Amino acid sequence: MTTNSPSKVHVTTTINGQQHELLVPGYMSLLDTLRELIGLTGTKEGCLDGNCGACTVNIDGRIVDSCLVLGAEVNGKEVNTVEGMATPEGLHPLQQAFLEEAALQCGICTPGFLVAAKGLLDNEPSPTEGRIRHWLAGNLCRCTGYDKIVRAVQKVSD
Amino acid sequence: MVATYETKTDYKVIGNSPIRHDGLDKVTGRAIYGGDVKVPGLIWGDVIRSPHAHARIKSIDTSAAEAMEGVFAVLTHDDFPQADDKTIDAGEGTVNLRRGQSNVMADQKVHYKGHVVAAVAAVDRNTAEIAAQAIKVEYEVLPAITDVDAAMADGAGVILEGLVGDHLGENVENTNVARVFRHEFGNVDDAFANSDLVIERTVAMSMVHQGYIEPHNATAIWAQDDNLTVWSSTQGSFGVRSQVAGLLHVPESKVKVNYVEIGGGFGGKTVVYLAPIAALLSRKAGGRPVKLVMDRSSVFEATGPAPGGKIRMKIGVNKDGKIQAADTDLILEAGGFPGSAVGAAAICVFACYDLPVSRITGYDVLVNKPKSAAYRAPGSPQASFAIETVIDEICDELGFDKIQFRLDNAAHEGTRRGDGVQFIRVGLEECLVAAKESDHWNAPLGDAPAGKARGRGIASAYWMNGGGKSTCDLMLQDDGTVMLNEGSADIGGTRTSIAMQAAEVLGIPVEDFHPSIPDTDSIGFTGVTGGSRTTYTTGLAAYNAAQKLVIELKSRLADLWETSADKIDFNEGTFTANGDSIGIQELAGKLDPTGGPATSTSSVNLAEAGNAYGVQICDLEIDLATGKTDVIRYTAVQDVGKAVHPQYAEGQIQGGVVQGLGWALNEEYFITDEGAMANRSFLDYRMPTSLDMPMIDTIMVEVPNPLHPYGVRGIGEVPICPPLSAATQAVKEAVGKPFYELPVKPGRILEALNGD
């Protein structure tokens, strides 16, 4: 790249079930690694300081803001993004519920909400409304007022 | 001329809630937003911004950045061509091209902290950021003017040199007040003298931000053939085209704006910030594509907040419950350049009431803060807060029922709005009745737990909605499906709400429509998605295009059936004549002998839009130890005309309410004496989260808009307005003290509680 790019780090990681070998600039966030190096632009940039949740991804079963993680840090780890939620059989039930419940308007926060909500339901299949609201409080949505997002997650809950 | 319609009542498509056409792309991460644009050979731009709110630029040294490896271009205001001194329509507000250029990149002076001073383009984002920081700027720092009182004080420094203010028709130099205007009807002083009770209050509020989650972005190619291509997150591609062309002094025909998905706008993405910079950088970098993405602190510091300011409100009323007169001074912050939403505030401020006598005076005041932009019903939330605060106090003082008082004074068909316009059929009274009969209004507030207090507030508000220009094209396919092109940016499901209106006419399932939003070379002019105009205006273009397609198909079928077109009937998707009948989708495959594909197009330019009213009820609970508020129940009543897609209509109302509650209870620009925004992150600029809000109940009242065949009214704007006062009056009821300044944050509540 340029003289301004520090040395690169060799990273082997599994993203949405597929193994990737990458040379990641040392400064580069996981968000930019996904978006710029791999081309997975479903994960969105909203604030770059960990306060909006638009860039939420799942690393080894834990949801994180990918803008606060370096690409170099996911060596040997398993990363899952919104692009990995649907299967050849169809959409993930959360994706379907977001469509049916009109839980998105502009859609920019939607990937982050879906990954976050999946992180909840994977471990707690029957959360209360309060638990859903608490869990999703790290994801900002400015369009919906959250009502329909919470209902969509409730719809998929047992 | 304004067309009016007999409202249809029997619908097959309208009033259902199909899954939106762009939904799958948006839940799978496939949808392409402005930040996702990738073009071969792409390089990155970045900017350097002023650390001072008010300063003269003494020098800019770009040599270090220019010498840096990987840097392709460096840009200052000197690189901009001279723009014409003329004002163009930007959709929700206007832009003076010369001042717009100075807002995009500072010219000799910086008017607010975060004002762009220079830009670079480099091989990647990291290099661009390092190079921008290498640009050295020397400033002569001037005192920051951070509120309207300071800006209007005698001897105040002048922010925009050369500004000639228009003060009630008089030219005034050396002023920060760009405009003073007045709408007056009757003699307010006499009417106040004859009133049983007159209450006068002054309310104040800080700037707040639209808070869209997607930051501004732009990618541009300005090629050697002078053609300029732009991708940018915007509420209106044609607005970007006209602004980029005007600011860069090139013909509009040379500018093509590609549609990309937009991650929220709320009015704030009608003005261009980065697109002209990306274009000029591209030109200086030999036509390479250049992309810029704004960081969040710059979104706060340098893009369109809603104006803060002060509003003086005086209302006279008689003991029989009739308002005698109202008088207001609306003093709103334009920001670093002229042009606040005070004009719209003046239209909205008294629009809920049928007033015999009124006077509205508006002030557009420059301060050293970002140039304000439209934010959802621009000007109306502030205006609504002011009038509803005083109305609530009148009701308390004279013991009036808060809904009955509003009904007794409600604006209705024939009422003259404060700026002189007479209302056609409007639905405020129906909303008030629905609120009065609602479960919420009739349910007790309930006892607060120990250490807490509860209150209930109610408020109403108005937005005039938007019309203007829109285009829709239909192309019937051989298989009976329909390709639909329209020009409106889709921020909340409008591809579908527009397609549904054509589907209703044609009797074709909306699932068989393929709506697209093409680039500006490929669709007729369409205004911004804003002002609550899209489902109404672009929807009417779709309705008209569908009617034209029916006429075209009748003439084709007349050939096939060897009859005349006027003998053919069309009803719910089926053509009939002389005992023959054929469905429209079947006919689609038989058109070749009649002249090939059937298409139609319609453009509209609507002078009027119908009007929107909302009435909202807020219950909240306050922790008396901390001052923290929790909204525990909320009901939003709104006249939607006709809900085309009830789910998304309800979503607009719920989203507007929550933005309004953020404005009422938490959100504000916290500005230091030096004019810096201290809370320029989502951590410190506290927008509501899912944890802060309850479910938002809605009651959609349908009073048909006579200007639309299905009675559709715009719905997106008005719901943000009532929460400001509804929440504040609920706090007043809970703690027993009035509040005249927003936000009603925990600190202010504690101050009021501890004042006992």
Image: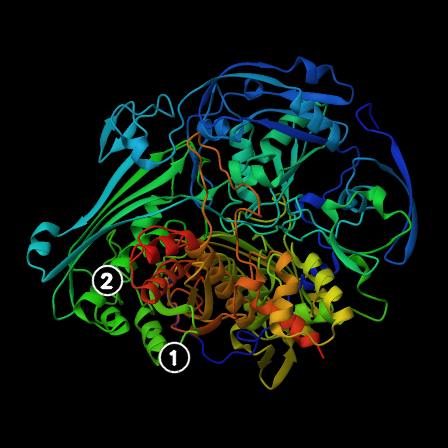
Disc 2 to disc 1, C-alpha distance = 23 Å
Where is residue B620 drawn, in percent x and y? 42, 67
Image spot of residue B478 (x, y percent): 73, 67
Q: Disc 1 residue type?
A: Ser
Q: Amino acid at mark 2?
A: Glu
**Nearer-the-camera pick, B210 or B237:** B210
Q: Chain of mark 2?
A: B
**Picture coordinates of residue A112, whole percent (x, y):** 70, 57
Q: Residues within 10 Å of mark 2 (few under 14, many from 20)?
A: some
Pointer 1 chain = B
- Seen in the picture, residue B624 relative to A10 is either above or below; the reply is below
- For this rendering, which residue is in front, B423 or B71? B71
Measuring 67% from the left and 68% from the top, which residue is drawn there? A99
Residue nearest the observer in this picture, A16 or B447: B447
Image quadrant assignment for residue A122: bottom right
Q: Residue furthest bottom?
A: B579
Write down the quadrant of residue A98 in the picture: bottom right
Q: Is residue B368 above or below residue B214?
A: above
Question: What quarter of the picture does the N terminus of chain B occupy?
Answer: bottom left
- Would you say residue B244 is visible in this rendering? yes
Coloration of the structure image: rainbow
- Say which of A48 and B379 sits in front: A48
Q: Which mark is residue B203?
A: none
Nearer the observer: mark 2 or 1; the answer is: 2
Can you say whether B11 is above or below B26 in the image? below
Res. A100 visible in picture: no
Q: Which residue is mark 2?
A: B393
User: In percent of the image, x 41 and y 21: which residue is there?
Assistant: B142
Which residue is identified by label 1? B438
Q: What is the secondary structure assignment of the residue under circle 2? A: helix
